[in-house]
Amino acid sequence: MKMITAIIKPFKLDDVRDALAEIGVAGMTATEVKGFGRQKGHTELYRGAEYVVDFLPKVKLEIAIAADRLEEAIEAITKAAQTGKIGDGKIFVSDIEQTIRIRTGETGETAL
């Protein structure tokens, strides 16, 4: 089992959710976060004063998935989240040692 952590632009959340639903991904967790990478923020003008926005709003998605479905999930996220501009985000993949469904006690991939 794998854990996909994707950091995407907020307005792409619905597109990514729909793309994952199309390939049969049953669930995910989305969290509003702030951060920056190579983008390094930007300056904005507010009431005549210029200020720097260091941390930009992003959405962090966490998706637990069977290892054999990993590549199609990554492809779906990439296609749906890509704008071609700086700040599109990143995808991280890590291993999951164990999964337990609290309600039923199921473990492993059946708990996903």
Image: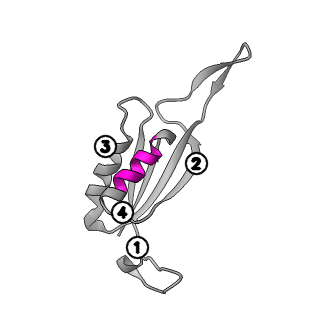
Q: Secondary structure at mark 1?
A: loop
What's the CA distance linking mark 3 and mark 4? Answer: 15 Å
The kind of residue on which mark 2 rests is Glu
What's the CA distance linking mark 2 and mark 1? Answer: 23 Å
Q: Position of residue 4 (x, y in %)?
A: 40, 58
Label disc, if present, on residue 32 of the rendered structure: 2
Q: Residue at x 72, y 13 (%)?
A: 48
Mark 3–mark 1 CB contact (< 8 Å) = no
Display colour scheme: one colour
Q: Residues within 10 Å of mark 4 (few under 14, many from 20)?
A: some
Magenta stretch?
12-20
What's the CA distance linking mark 3 and mark 2? Answer: 21 Å
Is 45 or 1 nearer to us in this picture? 45
Q: Residue at x 44, y 42 (%)?
A: 12
> On the image, numbered disc 1 is attached to which residue?
112
Instruction: Please give left or right for residue 22 compared with residue 46 in the image.
Output: left
Q: Secondary structure at mark 4?
A: loop
> On the image, numbered disc 3 is attached to which residue?
79
In the displayed image of the protein, which residue is found farthest to the top?
48
Q: Residues within 10 Å of mark 2 (few under 14, many from 20)?
A: few
* Quadrant assignment for the N terminus: bottom left
What's the CA distance linking mark 4 and mark 1? Answer: 10 Å
